[in-house]
Amino acid sequence: MRVARFSVQGTQAFGVVEGEPGEELVSVIDGHPFGEFGLSGLQLPLVDVRLVAPVLPSKVIGLGRNYADHAAELGNEVPDEPIVFLKPSTSVIGPNDPIPYPMLSREVHHEAELAIVIGRLVREVPIERALEAVLGYTCANDVTARDLQRSDAQWTRAKGFDGFCPIGPWIETELDASDVAIECRVNGELRQSARTSLLLRGIPELIAYVSAFMTLLPGDIILTGTPAGVGPIEVGDSVSVEIEGIGALTNRVTSSE
Ligand code: ZN
């Protein structure tokens, strides 16, 4: 099931997206996708609604260097312990929203990532039960100011600008995400291409690791790390993250001046 959040006539609602590409309908959800819900009976063509970020997370947890080839391309070792960072909720944007190029950076990179969407409150969940916490998966772009990442002692500034966490287009709730293709294109040119089976730490392990020190709330997002091929994006570029079984998330980089 594909759960989207959308804006129509100034109000926002959740809906289930069904149908063939180009002919999808959004069935409006009565209730909330994190609990019991039904369908209101109202259906709208997908082309007539504006999708927004599928969730508003209380926090976005990022994982650094979770693909060996990406760690190597930036000259880094694979860490013994996962590298964890936070992106603020204000960095989250939805599909087709602009990524404002920050005045403070000269080197902004795309990072295509599989995003785990947490569906229930969990704390200290064991690996064997970690998948019970998952509502579904979506595409994410862990946009990073690489120059600030190098110059700062930690990554809050590099990873935290407004618009630096596009997610969407929707949450796929029935996906086995352990081995799906992930790609990033900039202006149609393939920049990143990998499979999630190459994650150094898999999805259950990441959820268990993070929940051991931080309570995860419904709607929270865990970014699973990016594969090799990261590179610069410039004002005017169109950047797309596509994940097999989910769909494509596209955003344009705009000037913040
Ligand atoms: Zn990343």
Image (tube, rainbow, N blue to C red):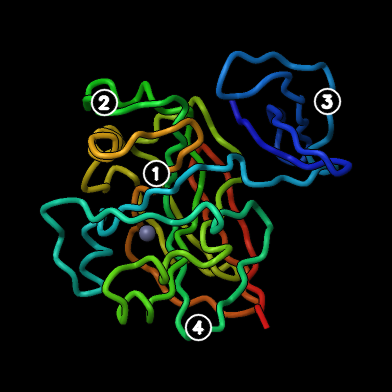
Residue 13 image offset from top left, x and y in percent: 74, 33
Of the image marks 1 and 3, the number of the one nearer the N terminus: 3
Q: Which of the 4 image quarters holds residue 166?
A: bottom right
The residue type indicated by label 4 comes to Leu
The residue type indicated by label 1 comes to Ile
Q: Nearer the viewer, residue 149 or 25?
A: 149
The residue shown at (56%, 54%) is: 92
Q: Tell me the distance, in whole angstroms, between the alpha carbons under discs 3 and 4.
A: 44 Å
Relative to 221, say whether 16 is above or below: above
Of the image marks 3 and 4, the number of the one nearer the N terminus: 3
Of the image marks 4 and 2, the number of the one nearer the N terminus: 4
Q: Is residue 57 left or right of residue 224?
A: right
The residue tagged 2 is: 125
Residue 142 image offset from top left, x and y in percent: 45, 59
Q: Nearer the viewer, residue 194 or 104?
A: 104
The residue tagged 1 is: 222
Q: In the image, which is nearer the foreground, mark 1 or mark 3?
A: 1
The residue tagged 3 is: 43
Indicate if the residue with disc 4 has its beta carbon within 8 Å of ligand 1.
no
Mark number displayed over residue 104: 4
The residue shown at (25%, 33%) is: 208
Extreme residue in the left direction: 80
Q: Nearer the viewer, residue 11 or 107?
A: 11
Relative to 205, say whether 130 is above or below: above
Of the image marks 1 and 2, the number of the one nearer the N terminus: 2
Q: Secondary structure at mark 4?
A: loop
Q: Tell me the distance, in whole angstroms, between the alpha carbons under discs 3 and 2.
A: 38 Å
Q: Which of the 4 image quarters holds residue 154?
A: bottom left
Extreme residue in the right direction: 9
Report crowding for label 3: few under 14, some 14 to 19, many 20 or more residues within 10 A (C-alpha): some
Report crowding for label 2: few under 14, some 14 to 19, many 20 or more residues within 10 A (C-alpha): many
